[in-house]
Amino acid sequence: MKIAVAGTGYVGLVTGICLAEHGHEVTCVDVDEEKIAVMQSGKPPIFEPGLDELMLKNMERLTYTTDYRSAYAGAKVIFVGVGTPEKRDGSANLSYIYAVADQIAESVSEECVIVIKSTVPIGTNDRVEDYLKDALKGRVNIHVASNPEFLAQGTAVRDTLHASRIVIGVEDPFSEKVLREVYEGFDAPLIVTNRRSAEMIKYASNDFLALKISYINEIANLCEVIGADIEDVSKGMSYDSRIGSQFLRAGIGYGGSCFPKDTKALNWLARFNDHEIKTVKAAIEVNENQKFLPVKKAARYYKDLKGVKVAVLGLTFKPGTDDLREAPSLVTVPVLLDDGAKVRAWDPVGVENFKKRLEGEVEYCDTIEETLKDAELCLIFTEWPEVKAIKPETFVQLMKNPIVIDGRNCFETEEIRGVSGLVYDSIGRAVIDNR
Ligand code: UDX
């Protein structure tokens, strides 16, 4: 089937390439000429494991262009995967969605289905359909359908090719028929709902996961106070299949392009409709406080951080991505710099993006060893495999004052216990002070 995809970010590009893998002819559209040129040369503009190979493998079925007119004119289905960033009031900014809608109205000449993949507030699909119908004035028969994505960065290709479920929200049989054809080759449960329910499934799923993380983080904070161990607590909980084992990892809070934005958007939507969504509101608050935990913990060891050499390991919001959106490092590092600390940082792929977002002096290192050398405090923000592979003795050997604040519980307490001289302060577990 001829498919166009608007937007070549994590959602749009991964969707387009996975649809090509399933035999569709896909044209990926973006307004950014530089990005298009990169993709035309066979490379993905984002870091996402497995994407480059699939791009190469399916190059005959993939086109990348800024020429939206011909892309949309020839497509039976147009997927919209542009960003819906957070506005200052917490609501979702839909300007990119409407910009694409304008381009679609300008271009289409045959009956087609416009499928919104971007996460949008409930009711947006209805409004986009009205908007397009107004603009087209009956010239072309168009349909709008919702098809939220559930991909996580770092595993986006796998999450799309082997989806947990495919949700389609439709209001007409034509859209349902076409979308069933699109996803014919995918081995995943297909859930057909109306558009508003599909939109809500996305928010309710993401916000539930965010809530689960904030819940375990609150339990972790309490564990520290009462002398329990969060790793044991999470493990003990996980055997209950009603709870499950995933998203029970305590840490310094969730970041990324979805959870922070989608919790705030649902909270905003509830308020806008004179409702209060207390659980989600609490998850947001807990997460914001959690991000400051490393700074609070640092104060246990240094009354004043002025001149203190701090080694930062990991900058991205999670491993497997170069994305820094809402990363806890972006909250903490500026505070450290404001307090006069001398910050040295390491991240395998996130440094370039970090440089773009941070004002202030940070020294970037190529190796973990270089970062730790002579440091007086180490903060771990991301559980990269390289960080988890550090032998705890290395902290003592390289650091001037081996105090480690581990925001992602990268080490078992057993590994740490015998390491003389090390102070290890993690999340939801007792501090181990081997001095
Ligand atoms: C998330 C959802 O998983 C995905 O389904 C949705 O489509 C988009 O949002 P993503 O943001 O890529 O995906 O990453 P995810 O792996 O879910 O992690 C988000 C954040 O939560 C990270 O900062 C991670 O460190 C944190 N997290 C996750 C925890 O702190 N504890 C956990 O147990 C799990």
Image (spheres, rainbow, N blue to C red):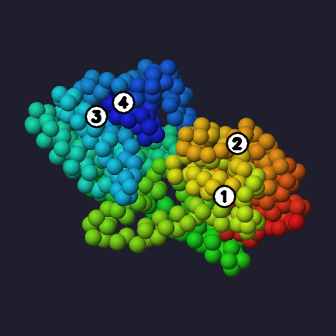
Callout 2: helix, strand or loop?
strand
Crowding around mark 4 (Cα neighbors within 10 Å: few <14, some 14 to 19, many 20+) is some
- The Cα–Cα distance between marks 3 and 2, rounded to whole angstroms, is 48 Å
- Residue 122: x and y in percent read 29, 56
Give the quarter of the figure containing the C terminus. Answer: bottom right
Callout 4: helix, strand or loop?
loop
Crowding around mark 2 (Cα neighbors within 10 Å: few <14, some 14 to 19, many 20+) is few
Badge 4 vs badge 3, beta-carbon distance below 8 Å: no
Q: Residue furthest left?
A: 138
Badge 4 vs badge 1, beta-carbon distance below 8 Å: no
Give the quarter of the figure containing the N terminus. Answer: top left
Nearer the N terminus, badge 3 or badge 1?
3
- Mark 1: amino acid: Asp
Residue drawn at x 88%, y 61% as measured from the top left:
421
Residue ID for mark 1: 339
- The Cα–Cα distance between marks 1 and 2, rounded to whole angstroms, is 16 Å
- Mark 4: amino acid: Val
In the rendered view, tell whether residue 314 sits above or below residue 365: below
Nearer the N terminus, badge 3 or badge 2?
3
- Residue 109: x and y in percent read 17, 28
Nearer the N terminus, badge 4 or badge 2?
4
Nearer the N terminus, badge 4 or badge 3?
4
Residue ID for mark 4: 31
Residue ID for mark 3: 77
Nearer the N terminus, badge 4 or badge 1?
4
- Mark 2: amino acid: Glu
